[in-house]
Image (cartoon, helix red, strand yellow):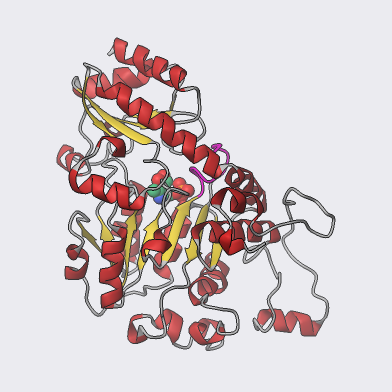
Amino acid sequence: MDQSKMHPETLALHAGYRKDDTNAVAVPIHMTTSYQFDSTEHAENLFALKELGNIYSRIMNPTCDVMEQRVAALEGGVAALALASGQAASTFAILNLCKAGDNFVCSTDIYGGTWNLFQNTLKDLGIECRFVDPADPENFRKATDDKTRCYYAETLPNPKLHVFPIKEVADIGRAEGVPLIMDNTAAPVLCKPLEHGAAVVIYSATKYMGGHGTSIGGMLIDGGNFDWEAGGDRFPTLNQPDPSYHGAVWTEAVKPLGPIAFIIRARVILLRDMGSAMSPFNAFQFIQGIETLPLRMARHCENAVKVAEFLKGHDKIENVIHPSQQSGEPAKRRDAYLKGGHGALCGFELKGGADAGRKFIDSLELLYHVANIGDARSLAIHPATTTHSQLSVEDQAKAGVTPGYVRLSIGLEHIDDIIADLSQALDKV
Ligand code: PLP
């Protein structure tokens, strides 16, 4: 059957693997560091990329390969790279295009860990991140110059949960010759950023993709839809001789293989040199998660809408933050980019401020109090005392975090049990 015509539910179970030479139906875990070469000629060809094949598990592994093919198929990309964490995926996405002296433009609405990486660690490497407010897509154009190598944003960023204007910014980028990289961690299956013009997608697989809170991992997906060659001087890492691989020009070298210059360079240069490889055992765990991802996302979203409805009517709550509750421009973007559900992250502001927030969290009996999202279990956190505690109160407010703000990641328990726990904790506030 033609894979390009298959639905996400089918791809999640079948893409990238049917059976191997043992006829195993479940994807085997290949716990091996290295692979025997057939001959010196074979080894030479593999190293010269004249032939594709396994060399060493820091750079490729058959279990990770299934995960890569499966996620590329689900996203509508041409190829993917499995990495040790979501942080490794966002780092690779930028370092694959930017060198010291370059810049990129990034939405202000991003995960705090990504913010730190871009604002501080990449700055120390000489790469400038220019943060702009995504409410007006034109801000991306205004911040662009000759040294701008990419745009970066999250599809469904918390805490505000305003869906990013993907097509609007991708179109500006394409007019300026700049690719858009989207972190789609909070909206797998619900949104396919490549269909809206993004060039690269990244994930923290740790979240919904794994779905069971067992493994840290990341994914980088190449849309194969951006012309790095035509970009000329903007993309020297991809279209000029690479001294780190005997002068290979990646846009030329991949021509027999397809439009995969971005992902090939990420694998054979960045992963080779930095070594943030995904463990095959974790890839196996993620593959189990992905098999039920479409099913789980539907139930996550269904439960979250019911939680938002419950919270909306509660007298101790000032404001409920969930895409299902939005109107105006945020609702328009939600409807344009989220299909089949509004996501399962949900926030609310307690009238009683920080003390009420602490009391609520300490009173939960079913929901876990953790710094994570996307688990099958429901999770809660009070950002003002945890994830955002290092920011000033003013900066917390800019990020959408008030003292009484609580973030929920709604899981797959029976909705009545989730609401019963929220309700008894709210009674104690
Ligand atoms: N991107 C988003 C949207 C996240 O929420 C996270 C982690 O919370 C990351 C990236 C980083 O992923 P990881 O924790 O797998 O490194």
> Based on the displayed image, in which of its 4 quarters is residue 159 positioned?
top left
> Based on the displayed image, in which of its 4 quarters is residue 144 positioned?
bottom left
Could you say where residue 150 lies in the image, as x and y percent from the top left? 33, 70
Residue at horizontal 26 percent and vertical 24 percent from the top: 312
Could you say where residue 403 lies in the image, as x and y percent from the top left? 21, 29
* Quadrant showing the C terminus: top left
Along the line of sight, which residue is nearer the eye, 223 or 238?
A: 223
Q: Could one spot residue 276 in this view of the protein?
A: no
Residue at horizontal 49 percent and vertical 61 percent from the top: 220
Along the line of sight, which residue is nearer the eye, 175 or 302?
A: 302
* Quadrant showing the N terminus: bottom right
Q: Main secondary structure of the magenta part?
A: loop
Segment tinted magenta in the rendering: 205-215
Q: Could one spot residue 156 in this view of the protein?
A: yes
Residue at horizontal 56 percent and vertical 78 percent from the top: 258
Residue 211 magenta: yes
Query: Would you say 252 lies left or right of 201 here?
Result: right
Residue 413 magenta: no
Could you say where residue 255 lies in the image, as x and y percent from the top left? 55, 84
> Based on the displayed image, in which of its 4 quarters is residue 63 positioned?
bottom right
Along the line of sight, which residue is nearer the eye, 31 or 74?
A: 74
